[in-house]
Image: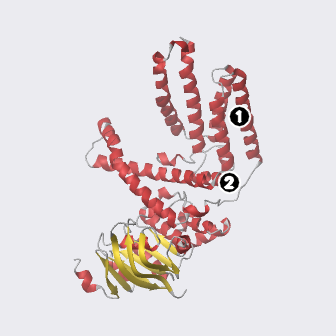
Amino acid sequence: MTGTVLALRQASIFHEADGPAVLEGISFSIQAGERVALLGLNGSGKTSLLMGCVGLLFHRGEVEIAGIALGRQTLAQVRRQVGFLFNVPEDQLLLPRVIEDVAFGLLQRGLAAEEARRQAERVLQELGISRLAGQPLHHLSHGQKLRVALAGALVTRPQLLLLDEPSAGLDPPGRRRLVELLCRLEAGMLVATHDIDFARQVCRRFLVLDRGQLVYDGDEPGPLLESWK
Amino acid sequence: MRLVWHDIWGCARGPVMRLAPRTRLLAGAGLFVSCLTLPVLERYGWLLLVGLVLSWLLLCRPPARMLLRTTLLGLVLLLPYFLLLPLLPSSAGTGWRALSVPTRVFLHGMSGLLVSVTTVMALTASDLREALVRLPLPRLVVAILLQIVQQTSKLLYESGRMAAAMSVRGASRGPTAAWRILFSLPRSWLPRVLDRSDRVAAAMEVRGYDQAGVRPMLPMKQRVGDLLLLLAVMLVLVLAVYLRLETGR
């Protein structure tokens, strides 16, 4: 995978079409394989930015994913390039058993059931949760649900991963495994978090949002983050 | 293990569990319609009703505790109809004739409830998905039905947790606390449900749930047993319709 997987140019994000902007004049790009942390305090607009990137919120300006400009006509095409992890992983688990949910994205893309199951099992194995394959989703803990949701996002081998608070609610071993996993992945990713240690372990570049503005884009946000303490 | 309400799916252990999910769903639906069609106040109708309910229970073998709870629910829902007797117009008759109306409602209702809940117990949520996607139903209907089941399970689980949180945060145990929790649930529950439905809709959009419909994942295995059960159910259904037309009520 090469090239730019996500580019925003003077993008503004809105909750309502004619409402005030929650994010204004945002410009940055992410290259293939690049891992970028999106930092900010609660309410700074991290989740809104991620949602705006996949057309869940209104936008003005340019949003481009894997070379495809986000618009009404290209919405499905854009979303096919993205693996999205919501901040409440339970919300994105739509089928009753783990294996079915993970294979769902592949079946939607027209893969044969047997092949979809095989690939889903492989991803579950990569995430160290193959033993959960036959489990009903409501029997899982938060950490397990998070990994299943991540498996569902990864199984289609997306070019871009948008992860919203992926480390929230994980125990230390679970967090460590997640760091290892994310560092192994080849996809470009934008990780929204306010867990700075986690962000430093996974990412080399940091974007900082503050009150709807991008106030920092670089590799050492230290001084800025000091002001949060 | 303690059986919680959302574990009701697929908790039966009878021989019918070896049959294809589609067969179980169709058989349950056919028997349910038969229960509602049979003229339950006629001798043959009544006998056939009892026979079909017992046969379905034996074939599915649901857990006794779940069966008892379902029966109690049926009694709570349907017995009050007998309290309406004094309100019936005099043209409805007196004595047995007047009793026939709530009795019919009771028998249709109780048998329908037992058959439908037992069918649910004979299908896991995955079985339901496999069964629905193999039936000639509109894609959208299948997708919506599956999400209703899926999200209802989640909401029931969440409601349990909210009730536990409320009792920890002040309401003590006992019937008064239970009532207080029950009546305050909608106030705290509804905003959560609305919020969640927004988030789930967003996730469905992003995951492409709305685009191609849900597709089956398991190979379909049709056995002789599937065919026999479907034939038997069809026979019962035809018989029920015939008896209904014959007796004219």
Type of the residue with mark 2: Arg
User: Is residue A173 something that shows in the picture?
Assistant: no
Among the two numbered marks 2 and 1 on one chain, the one whose residue lies closer to the N terminus? 2
- Direction from residue A196 to residue A177 in the image, left or right: right
Q: Residue at x 50, y 61 (%)?
A: A93
Mark yes or no: residue B66 visible: yes
* Image quadrant in which the C terminus of chain A is located: bottom left
The percent position of residue A29, horizontal first and vertical second, equals: 43, 84
Task: Give the answer, above or below, for where A203 lies relative to B206.
Answer: below
Q: Residues within 10 Å of mark 2 (few under 14, many from 20)?
A: some
Most foreground residue, A99 or A128: A99
* Residue identifier under label 2: B134
Q: Chain of mark 1?
A: B
Residue at mark 2: chain: B
Q: Residue furthest right?
A: B224
- Which residue is under mark 1? B237
The residue at 51%/62% (across/down) is B204
State whether discs 2 and 1 lie on one chain: yes
Determine whether A47 is above or below A64 in the image. Answer: above
Q: Position of residue B241 (x, y in %)?
A: 71, 30
Name the image quarter holding the N terminus of chain A: bottom right
Q: Circle 1 sits in a helix, a strand or a loop, which is it?
A: helix
What x and y, as percent, mark residue B196?
41, 57
Q: Position of residue B78 (x, y in %)?
A: 50, 28
Separation (CA) of disc 2 from disc 1: 22 Å
